[in-house]
Structures are given as structure tokens and as C-alpha cells.
Amino acid sequence: MIDWLTSAAFTAFGAPTTWAELLGFATGLVNVALLVRQHILNWPLGILNVLLLMVVFWSAGLYADAGLQIVYVVLGLYGWWAWLYGGERRSRLVVRSTTPREWLALAAAGVVLTGGLWLFLDRLTESTVPFADAVTTALSLLATYGQTRKLVESWWLWIAADLIYIPLYGYKDLWLTAILYVAFLVLCILGLRSWRAARREVVAA
């Protein structure tokens, strides 16, 4: 199965595109579109998506991104549960803003994650882009956690990560994935608008 996933489906921009990258492209688009609409099925589809991307990133030498996918599986399972039962009295979660205390915790976690991953990747792996890999990994983890709690501002963290991911994947010749993240960027902007509207409805209710 792994051999098939890592085999070339077609060639784009002079570089082979694997079946794992192609399937990751398709499931990723549908996953984020469901997330924008707050549809619960975004979580199981997202778990499938990150397993495919794990294969893609490991093959490309993006080791932090590959390892990150394992954490995404855990966060996906948690998000699935939290959206259903994580609200008051085990009710469904509603969209809300990030509190100042949460921002401080996220900022501190981001600094620690980035610094720790940068040192690890720079000294213990063959990563050619240790700092960019560390920053995007930290932003992605924080954004995903924010979305498990339906925090509106988590979309801003995804937007920041996508703006780094797009040129990073182009540099690694993962052109289909780079194009996917351009689409993700557009969907993140739509998601931010949609969740802001949902938050206003909650506040007005």
C-alpha cells in the first residue's frame, strides 16, 4: 500500500506527484470546506487526510510535518468528541472568541514549540528547512487546537501558516500540495467570515 501511495500518479511542473499527494489534495479540500460549514464530518475526513499527508511529508524529508500528522490524528479525535459533547452540560460547542488568557497560553506554547522543534530538526534530522518547518508546525498545532474549541481567531493562525506553507512546498517540489494550500488560504478567509457571522448570532441570541 505504501509503495503504491508513494508511486507517481502524474508529473506536474517537472516533478512527480504521488498518489498520496493527489488523494491528500482531494480529501484536504473537502475537509476544510466542511470545517468552514462547521460540519462534524470534517473530523473523520480530516484524520484520513493527515494520514495521507504523513506519507507525503516523510517522503519529502519534512519530518516535523510528518510527525505533526500523528498529533493531528489525536486532535481530530478530540475535536470530533468536543464538537459533540464539549459544550456546557455536554452539549455541542458554539463558536466564540479567544480570551486574553487563552491568547497568552497560545503565544507561550507557540514560542516553546517553535524553539524546541527548530533545535530538534536542526541538530538531529536532515531537514533542509528546520526553522520554516518548526514555525509552520507550531502554528498548525495551535490553529487545530483552536478549532477543536471553535475559536474564531484560529482561522488567523491557519492563514499565517498557509502563507509560509505555500512557498515552502513549492521549494520542496510538492507543487500540488502548494496549490492545495492556496485553496486552503481562500477557504480560511471564507471560514473566518463564516465563523464571525456564527459568533455574532450566538452573541445576539
Image (cartoon, rainbow, N blue to C red):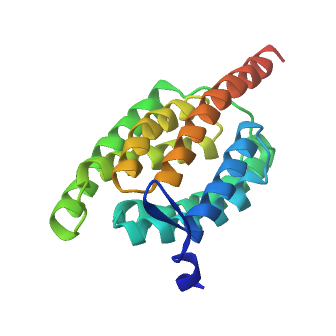
Q: Decide if residue 15 is in sight here.
A: yes
Q: Residue furthest left?
A: 123
Q: Nearer the viewer, residue 113 or 49?
A: 49
202 versus 159 height, above or below: above
Using the image, determine if residue 74 lies above or below residue 196.
below
Residue 56 drawn at (x, y percent): 48, 67
Lateral position of residue 61 relative to residue 193, left or right:
left
Of all residues shown, which one is farthest toward the right? 205
Q: In the picture, which quadrant includes the C terminus?
A: top right
Percent coordinates x, y for residue 5 in the rendering: 57, 76
Residue 152: horizontal and vertical position, in percent? 61, 29
Front-lying residue, 110 or 137: 137
Q: Quadrant of residue 73?
A: bottom right
Looking at the image, can residue 96 be seen?
no
List x then y, in percent, for residue 179. 53, 45
Left or right position of 114 against 24: left
Looking at the rendered structure, the number of numbered marks drawn on it comes to 0
Left/right placement of residue 13 relative to residue 115 reads right
Q: Quadrant of residue 166?
A: top left
User: Residue at position x 47%, y 39% from top?
Assistant: 162
Q: Is 52 on the left-hand or right-hand side of 30?
A: left
Q: Residue at x 67, y 48 (%)?
A: 29
The correct choice, above or below, for 160 with respect to 8 in the image is: above
Q: Quadrant of the N terminus?
A: bottom right
The residue positioned 59% from the left and 40% from the top of the image is 184
